[in-house]
């Protein structure tokens, strides 16, 4: 029997090990989910809302255990753990609240003698494949709306956060979901692909790497099932000459280094107008020096380890390559005693003198490093921001909303922020362009990807 383990980035100890699901278990889970879905779709939207709300509350009731458990699994400091559950609840409650309107029939103009409308019907079985970096937030984006729309859900969580998948199962059971409606499965990559290729599911919602996204698309090819992909980013920020400097420094440093930079919408490259450049760099370096790198179990820690030593080694390599090519590193790793070669603990770093020939400005880092470049105009900033194969979010710092609108309209990204970053508003569509993927979660548009349109065209009488 094949077994997989979650190895803690804190100390290399095994947090938990689980066997992969057997072929019989997978077959049973799919059959139970499809049977449960037939009963679930017949429930009223109000009844679904009651149980989905109970599911959220059941998850929140486990906060005291979840926060340290999450730190052990993927390294986020305990001081921030409750924030993810807060966001989990915010998104879940919002999608429940908007469901009646989002799922309401679309009724065209009245036509005498006819009844016409477009219904939103569930797809059937939704397969959510969730990542480790925001394991509750990313999963809830598809799970709650899928359930509210009348679907059943299979959940495959990342091995690094395997206990999170089990928390979802526990919350579903506590809430009283019908047996099999939400099922967490411990799956290998090969089993995941087989489930998709065999057309056991009707929709795949995946968050992860570009290459893994390509594998999923190939598995789904020819099966005529929906695929939603959020595949990463190299998200840029632009600080205009009229920006509030202190606010820009504070929010962008947080946007670059929160969660040790392991956020698909974290800030990875910053372009600053020459009028503010020197002051911005000075402020960003000073603020970053106040970060405390250490064990995520310590309440004083503000920067935990990366998810694994190999991830930290990749970022170390990007930094070394950039410095060798002429970039300047502004922070001394020795000032962060927990920083250690070969470990998952990596000191934050700010680089200047960078350009787009360097990996650190081109390839997704997913770690605590950010490059800063000086620009002389909006046009130069726009060109540099768009010079990327990714397009998840972009952020502008300016006190001029008119100028910001003009810039935002030219930026190739799914979301453009003004004077903030690294945040998902559940009322807005979460989507990306280019290699970041395709599809939409959250907002009313998210429901469109978890339902199918069915038109009703009734002639009410044949006597005339």
Image (cartoon, rainbow, N blue to C red):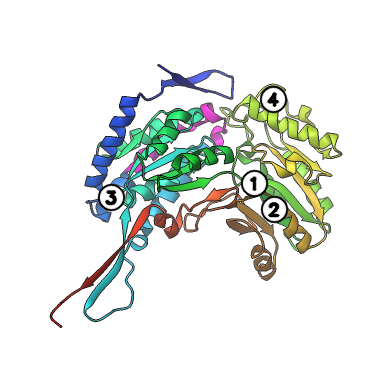
First-in-chain label (3 vs 1) = 3
Q: Say what secondary structure mark 3 lies in.
A: helix
The residue singled out by tag 2 in the image is: 237
The residue singled out by tag 4 in the image is: 338
The numbered dot on residue 368 is none
Query: Answer yes or no: do the residues labelled 1 and 2 have beta carbons within 8 Å?
Result: yes
Q: Main secondary structure of the magenta part?
A: helix
Most distant residue in the top direction: 1
**Does any portion of residue 85 appear in the rendered image?**
no
Most distant residue in the right direction: 326
- Whether the magenta-drawn stretch holds residue 43 is answered as no
The image position of residue 117, as x and y in percent, is 29, 69
The residue singled out by tag 1 in the image is: 255
Task: Please state the total of marks drawn on the protein image.
Answer: 4
Rate crowding at label 1 as few (under 14), some (14 to 19) or many (20 or more) other CA atoms within 10 Å. many
First-in-chain label (3 vs 4) = 3
How far, Cα to Cα, is label 3 from label 1?
A: 36 Å
Question: Where does the magenta region start and end?
Answer: 55-79
The residue singled out by tag 3 in the image is: 48
Query: Answer yes or no: do the residues labelled 3 and 4 have beta carbons within 8 Å?
Result: no
First-in-chain label (3 vs 2) = 3
């Amino acid at each position: 029997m094949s077994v997989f383990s979650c190895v803690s980035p804190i100390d290399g100890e095994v947090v938990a090990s689980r066997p992969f699901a057997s072929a019989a278990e997978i077959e049973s889970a799919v059959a139970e989910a499809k049977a449960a879905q037939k009963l679930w779709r017949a429930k009223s939207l109000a009844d679904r809302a009651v149980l989905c709300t109970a599911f959220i509350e059941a998850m929140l009731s486990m906060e005291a255990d979840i926060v340290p458990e999450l730190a052990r699994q993927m390294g986020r400091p305990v001081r921030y753990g409750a924030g993810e559950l807060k966001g989990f609840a915010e998104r879940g409650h919002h999608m429940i609240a908007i469901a009646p309107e989002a799922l309401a029939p679309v009724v065209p103009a009245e036509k005498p003698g006819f009844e016409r409308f477009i219904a939103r019907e569930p797809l059937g079985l939704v397969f959510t494949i969730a990542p480790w970096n925001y394991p509750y937030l990313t999963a809830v984006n598809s799970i709650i709306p899928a359930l509210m729309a009348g679907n059943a859900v299979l959940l495959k969580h990342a091995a690094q956060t395997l206990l999170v998948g089990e928390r979802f199962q526990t919350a579903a059971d506590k809430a009283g979901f019908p047996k099999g409606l939400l099922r967490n499965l411990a799956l290998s990559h090969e089993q995941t692909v087989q489930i998709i290729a065999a057309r056991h599911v009707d929709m795949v919602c995946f968050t992860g790497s570009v290459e893994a996204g390509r594998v999923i698309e190939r598995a789904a090819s020819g099966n005529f099932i929906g695929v939603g992909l959020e595949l990463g980013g190299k998200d840029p920020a632009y600080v205009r000459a009229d920006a509030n400097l202190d606010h820009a420094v504070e929010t962008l440093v947080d946007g670059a280094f929160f969660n040790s930079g392991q956020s698909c919408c974290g800030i990875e490259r910053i372009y600053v107008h020459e009028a503010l450049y020197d002051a911005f760099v000075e402020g960003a370096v000073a603020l970053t020096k106040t970060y405390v790198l250490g064990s995520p179990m310590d309440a004083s820690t503000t920067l935990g380890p990366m998810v694994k030593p190999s991830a930290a080694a990749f970022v170390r390599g990007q930094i070394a390559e950039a410095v060798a090519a002429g970039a300047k590193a502004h922070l001394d790793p020795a000032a962060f005693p927990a920083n250690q070669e070969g470990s998952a603990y990596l000191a934050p770093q700010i680089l200047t003198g960078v350009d787009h020939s360097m990996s650190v400005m081109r390839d997704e880092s997913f770690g605590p490093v950010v490059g800063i470049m000086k620009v002389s105009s909006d046009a130069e900033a726009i060109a540099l921001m768009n010079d990327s194969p990714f397009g998840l979010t972009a952020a502008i710092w300016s006190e001029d909303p008119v100028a910001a609108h003009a810039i935002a309209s030219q930026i190739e990204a799914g979301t453009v922020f003004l004077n903030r970053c690294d945040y998902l508003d559940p009322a807005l569509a979460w989507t990306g362009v280019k290699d970041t993927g395709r599809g939409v979660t959250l907002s009313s548009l998210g429901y469109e990807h978890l339902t199918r349109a069915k038109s009703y065209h009734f002639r009410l009488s044949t006597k005339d």
